[in-house]
Each structure stands twice: as structure tokens, then as C-alpha cells.
């Protein structure tokens, strides 16, 4: 679920997704970005990672401009209202909020397609 949310954060930066594929716990999105070079896209993604993670150096496992691959491994802590507290409001041993850690892996592959137009 966290992978899907993080992928959605990339949508406003780039453009609308052409397609999404959901298989098991993996979401794959393909985005077409016009008027940006591979280096500009690469820099934007690295900027987003450095803004949204406490330490970009700790979460980035691979960062290669030439191949266009960025691999991010992180942990997100999520706090939510504990439903057990609603069922047992007078129980002092049940906390009102609970936290859970979610491990995630984001793999980004930047590819360029060269199209030649033939004019007759």
C-alpha cells in the first residue's frame, strides 16, 4: 500500500500515468514525460528523495544516471487510531494510538525512446 502512495506522489511532478499494473504487492506505473531530459528527470527524483526522507544516503541503494536506475529502500512509521480502545475505552493498558512500520522498496527506471520521423 505504501508503494502505491509513494508512486502517486510522483504523478504531480511528471504527468498522468499511461498505465498501472497491480501484481501481488507491487504497483508498476509508466509515465511519459515530454520536454525533459533524462538528466532533468533524474535530478528531480533525487531532489524528491532528499526532501521526503530523513537521510537520502541511507535509503538510496543504487543511484546510476547512466543506466537511469534509482533504488530506494525505506521504512515508514504510520500512526493510527487503535480500534481496541474504542471497544474497551476504560482499559488503561490499551493505548489510543498505535504505530506500525512499513518497509518499502521503490525502483525507478528512466528510459528514453528515440523515435525517427520519416517525412515523404
Image (cartoon, grey):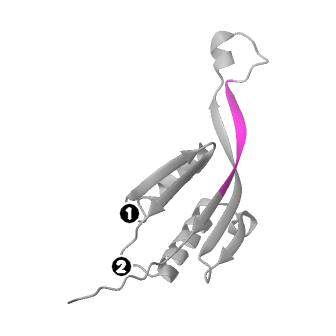
Q: Which secondary structure is most common in the magenta stretch? A: strand
Real-space CA distance between mark 2 and mark 1, rounded to the nearest whole angstrom? 11 Å
Tell me whether the residue at label 2 lies in contact with that at label 1, contact meaning CB atoms closer than 8 angstroms: no
> What residue is drawn where x is 54% and y is 54%?
28
N-term mark: 2 or 1: 1
Q: Quadrant of the N terminus?
A: top right
Q: Residue furthest front?
A: 120
Circle 2 Cα neighbour tier, 10 Å, few/some/many (<14 / 14–19 / ≥20): few
Residue 105, labelled with which disc?
none
Range covered by the magenta-colored residues: 96-105
Q: Residue 114 in the image: x percent, y percent?
A: 42, 83
Where is 53 relative to 66, above or below?
above
Q: Could you say whether the residue bearing mark 1 is in a helix, strand or loop?
A: loop
Image quarter of residue 50: bottom right
Q: Could you say whether the residue bearing mark 2 is in a helix, strand or loop?
A: loop
Q: Residue 82 in the image: x percent, y percent?
A: 66, 24
> What residue is drawn where x is 43% and y is 58%?
11
Q: Residue 39 in the image: x percent, y percent?
A: 51, 82
Question: Which residue carries the number 2 mark?
Answer: 35
Q: Is residue 47 magenta?
A: no
Amino acid at each position: 500500500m505504501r508503494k502505491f502512495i509513494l508512486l502517486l506522489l510522483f504523478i504531480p511532478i511528471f504527468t498522468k500515468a499511461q498505465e498501472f499494473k497491480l501484481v501481488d504487492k507491487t504497483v508498476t506505473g509508466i509515465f511519459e514525460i515530454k520536454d525533459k531530459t533524462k538528466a532533468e528527470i533524474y535530478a528531480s527524483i533525487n531532489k524528491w528523495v532528499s526532501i521526503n526522507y530523513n537521510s537520502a544516503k541511507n535509503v538510496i541503494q543504487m543511484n546510476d544516471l547512466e543506466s537511469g536506475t534509482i533504488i530506494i529502500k525505506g521504512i515508514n512509521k504510520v500512526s493510527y487510531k487503535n480500534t481496541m480502545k474504542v471497544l474497551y475505552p476504560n482499559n488503561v493498558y490499551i493505548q489510543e494510538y498505535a504505530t506500525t512500520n512499513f518497509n518499502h522498496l521503490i525502483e525507478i527506471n528512466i528510459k528514453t525512446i528515440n523515435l525517427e520521423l520519416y517525412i515523404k
